[in-house]
Image: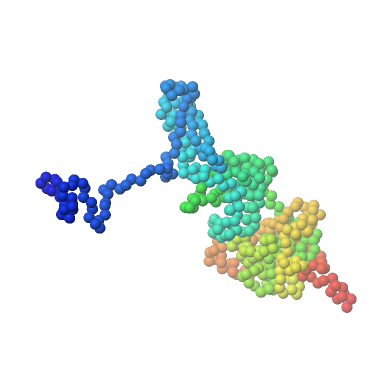
Amino acid sequence: MAFSKQDGAREVPEEVAGVQANSIAIAPPLPGRDIVFGTPKRRRKGPCMSRRRGQTGYVWQKNQNGNKDWDATAPAYGQVWIDVPGKEKRQRKFYQLGECRTKSEARRRLKEMIERDGINSTVEVTQSIDSTTFSQQAELWIKAIEDGRVLHRGKRTRIKPATVAGYKSAIEWMTPHIGKMPLANIKNAAAKELVTKMKQAELSDKTIVNYVHVLQSVIASVVNGEGEQVHPRTWDSHFIGLPVVNPKKQNRPTRTAKEIEKILAAVTGRHRVLYALLAGSGLRIGEAVAIRLGPMSDDYSTISEDCSTIYIRQAVWRGKEQDPKTQAAVRDVDLPKELAALLSEFVCDRKEGFLFRSASGKPLSPRNILRDSLHPALLALKQPRAGFHCFRRFRESMLQMSDARNLLIDYWMGHENREMGTRYAKQLIENIEWRKRWAEKVGLGFKLPALPLGIGQLGQPSEAKTQSAKAA
């Protein structure tokens, strides 16, 4: 269709003129052509969360009707509706606005309070929708860790089973107190009340800090599709009352050389050899019970034929072999000659199996050793109760008192050292003769008791063979 330049009248195409010559109606479109609207059809607006501006609240003064003028000297109040997790109906929240000269000033002051509390924020809306409790999320978090979906933050490796067991213990303690509480309600005030209960239960400062870290990790584990936290928190340690851990006040029992000698004299057999090895090498208990007899391998921990070097590659936790505590724990530990001689005598003619094994051939259980040997011995000697780590602390103190380099000390103890990755440090660590010379210089720091190892222990001649040999 077109418009005439002369009179502005619309010219109708010839195809249509014959049909509608005397009609004033708009001609229909030709076949095969589409109607194009100049203005698109508007979509009817409905409720949409993306367009939600939030509520501005309601301000009023007491004893004031709608027709009464605003009193600049009277206190003003504000009211808003808030979503409560776990409840269908919203609840009212009131604010004291103080004296406001005008109603507009009261509204502005109420708006600032609403923004401060984040009532209209998308985060608060999301939290109000999510009614997951602490127990439910803690169970999902532990499952994700065990499946390998949650990794160590710094190393990006799987979390050790011993660490997971500590997390479970923390969750088990906190569940009776906050297990049924929605995550949206667990903030600084709830954490403060929980810390107060921990102190009343006489938990140590370090335990309280660890438990609170688990609580924070469980809450932070809830994320949306973008990986952002659904329940972001700004934790205030001062408000919560979180204790400051003082390393000097922590219970870190150690032993002197004389006390080590008394412990060795109070036990016999494999336990004496085990304690002497722990005190003379600084091995962790899980590393010691994981040592096998046989050729050197990168798949498990072994000991050299002359028992002068231990190759730590694995550790035992609850009867299962796993990677050591850290990457630095993978190391070769050199032993003094007198300790190597004791181990050679203990090994005797065995060629395979664990160095410290049970009757079934499995590695010894540290828990059983504590119950059956170490704790009864400490009780009989009237020494303070302690675990296997006291032997490790004794060895580290002996190394620190010697002239050995810190690089070598950290290597033997399995500690992280920034210099360990340098070319110079690598040359020193790979110098076996240099390491063994220093192992002899440092020595044990205590005397091995000149007592028989005992008869009937695994790795030693049986009593029947000993008696038949004497009779012959």
Vertical placement of residue 452 versus 1, above or below: below
Outermost residue to the bottom: 472
Q: Which residue is drawn at 52% across and 45% down?
A: 129
Q: In this rendering, does residue 387 appear at all?
A: yes
Vertical placement of residue 468 versus 13, above or below: below
Which of 103/469 is in front? 103
Q: How far across and down, in percent of the image, does residue 403 sit?
A: 64, 60
Query: Along the horizontal axis of the image, is 338 left or right of 418?
Result: right
Which of 135/424 is in front? 135
Q: How far across and down, in percent of the image, does residue 136 sit?
A: 60, 50
Q: How far across and down, in percent of the image, does residue 214 sit?
A: 60, 49
Which of 285/212 is in front? 212
- For residue 33, which quarter of the picture? bottom left
Q: How far across and down, in percent of the image, does residue 193 sit?
A: 62, 40
What colour scheme governs how the chains and residues are painted in the rendered image of this protein?
Answer: rainbow
Q: In this rendering, does residue 443 appear at all?
A: no
Question: What quarter of the picture does the C terminus occupy?
Answer: bottom right
Outermost residue to the right: 471
- For residue 104, which quarter of the picture? top left
Q: Residue at x 75, y 57 (%)?
A: 370
Vertical placement of residue 292 versus 27, above or below: below
Q: How many labels does the image show?
A: 0
Q: Which residue is drawn at 63% across and 62% down?
A: 324
Query: Along the horizontal axis of the image, is 3 left or right of 202?
Result: left
Q: Which residue is drawn at 68% across and 72% down?
A: 304
